[in-house]
Amino acid sequence: MRTINLTLKIIQFDKAVDIDEYLVKHCGTDHEKKKEKFEALKKNAKQHMMLLRNQIKLYKNAIEDRNENADPGNKIKPNNIFIGKICAEYFKYAGAYFVESENNYRCNIFYENYIYELSDNPIFNAMMNRTAGLNASQNGFKIIRQEMTDTAINTGKKVKIPGWITAKRTTNTIFINLCNERNELLKLSPGEIEIIKNGSNQDSVYLRNASNMEEINPDLFEDETYIKEGMSEMKTLLFDNFPCALVNKYYLFVYMIASFFVNFFKAKGLLKASGDTGSGKTTAANIITHLIYKKDMTTIGTPASYFTEAAISPITVMDNYERQNIDKSILDFLLFVATGGNKMKRDRDRQTSNIFERASTQIYWTAIEPPEKEELINRTIDIQFNERYWKEDFLETEITDLIIEKRDKLLSTIFKLIAFKILPDFKNKHSKAIKWLNSRFKGHSKKRLNEMLATYSVILKEVCNYIPYTEGEEGVASHVAIVSKWIEIQNEIAKDVSINTDPVIRYVGYLLNAYKYDETEFKTNFPEIQVEPELTEIAISDHSIKEYKSISFDFKYDDLYTFIGMESKRIGEKNPFTSSGNLKSGLRKANKTLKSAGWNFEGEVKEKRNSHYRIYRLTKTFKLEPEPF
């Protein structure tokens, strides 16, 4: 039986104008031009199709009518392949097929503002029952589904499925999932904002939902007054309430906007929020995630949950991850995001194939301690928080409630800033920023993040037009001064964390961290290593403050070697020293480097010598900044 065309196409003309008049008006008497014009009209005509269940019923009725007059041996049954073709054609016109070309050609249907995966799953099966009157358990349903799958592969759009956001860098275009019931995307391109359908769009873009993302309702039109008002509100609600130095407020603000640019740089780096308890590092994360997600996303998760979240969410918050929490699996995750690498995993639905995932997120990592691995140190931007930067009238609940209330306007402001200010001529601006970073700060501590920092620099330049920098120098552009300060600060922090890759510097740093951030555990695990801290006057008078002038460690080489062995095992490294004698030699050779890092290897403590062993001393002296007022 041949397929019956059950599609009605309607071409609508102005009142009192028929097809002949229309064609003569536009084509004259040229027959070929009339033919081309008519074909174009048909292509763009509105299509109306009989309901799918009625089409199938019509086909089955035709079979019954034929069988009424047929001999018993010539009666036929409905053909499931033909029913499959009816279904395939229906969804081809009433919806859209698209195929995940990098995911083993997984097929999907976009229909009635919903995306259905073409597989044996309850959502798709229920839709077929509702739309076609077909039950997934009946004979032949698998054949029908296969016909639809074949049609999808042969005629559907081939798409790549990233996470919540993607970009086409060749055209400086960003696509964002609005996470609404209408399955819509926001398309930001130079000088333009538009809403398009997810999957069934001319750009062949299909994005997954970020599971924790609330619906976004953006305002689309360019309006300079709107941007000014929105940026002013964001300064009041977010920027001013970040409890850190002014240049770091700019970094956090740009970091937030850069969530929409994660596809413009490979190495995402890590934002590490440092500071003592009560310094505000978690509060800043709470403020930022209320804007992006409309909820607090400061949580502690598992490695598996972090990998999943990083593939689809704009910002992943890892709250209070200290040294004792960072095992190899967490370290692997941090490196996965920081370096912008790929993660291969088995496709759970098709056990013979693999899926490759890339991080589409930025990490916000709160901790008191600095990172340990050299690979992390080089890719971590450390933002220092301090309670002295708190606003006196700051009320966290009140601020987050206001952010929730104004979220659509604030995000719309960011979208307008991106589309109308940042994206135009973005490639040229980014290229200039890269060249400037490479020449002005050659070999700086975060040079592996230059691609990211160049993107931040372009964003920052526009931000400074709405949030003026008040601490700059005359004759130096605000964004240039701020980026220079960022790198200067990070160089200083990196020097304190790890001057170079010398294992002596690294492991005496681990020794210091182990004591400073968990004194009780250190004394329990390493009672042989004696510690003599010298507190500042403020810390002596106020026991809630941990502030040191210096910390001295008295040890036997065997005991220090034991500590290093345990630390190297904890962080997944081979012990860099082969014996306690090798460690002794390493300490003596590194004396000059130790001094440049604020350490003094004093050698043997003679007053503690006895006939059985000798004690040696290492002292760390801290640079103390005076209070600003």
Image (spheres, rainbow, N blue to C red):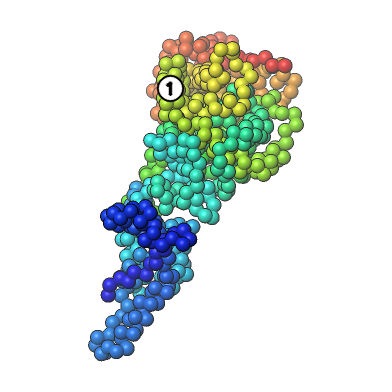
Q: Is residue 380 among the parts visible in the rendering?
A: no
Looking at the picture, how far across and down is residue 262, in whole percent? 47, 36
- Between 544 and 119, the residue placed more toward the observer is 119
Residue 465 placement, left or right of 32 = right
Looking at the picture, how far across and down is residue 139, in whole percent? 35, 74
Looking at the picture, how far across and down is residue 196, in whole percent? 47, 49
- Between 33 and 269, the residue placed more toward the observer is 33
Residue 64 placement, left or right of 443 = left
Tell me which amino acid carries mark 1.
Lys
Q: Is residue 575 among the parts visible in the rendering?
A: yes
Can you say whether 72 is above or below 269 in the image?
below
Residue at the (36%, 61%) spot, across then down: 20
Residue at the (50%, 41%) spot, across then down: 193
- Between 173 and 576, the residue placed more toward the observer is 173
How many neighbours does mark 1 have within 10 angstroms: few (below 14), some (14-19), or many (20 or more)?
A: some
Describe the element under mark 1 as helix, strand or loop.
helix
Can you say whether 20 is above or below 335 in the image?
below
Q: Quadrant of residue 627?
A: top right
The quarter of the picture where the N terminus appears is: bottom left
Numbered disc total: 1
Q: Which residue is mark 1?
A: 432
Q: Quadrant of residue 397?
A: top right
Residue at the (55%, 34%) spot, across then down: 417
Residue 629 placement, left or right of 333 = right
Can you say whether 43 is above or below 367 in the image?
below
Looking at the picture, how far across and down is residue 576, in whole percent? 40, 23
The quarter of the picture where the C terminus appears is: top right
Can you say whether 504 is above or below 318 in the image?
above
- Between 461 and 162, the residue placed more toward the observer is 461
Residue at the (62%, 41%) spot, across then down: 409
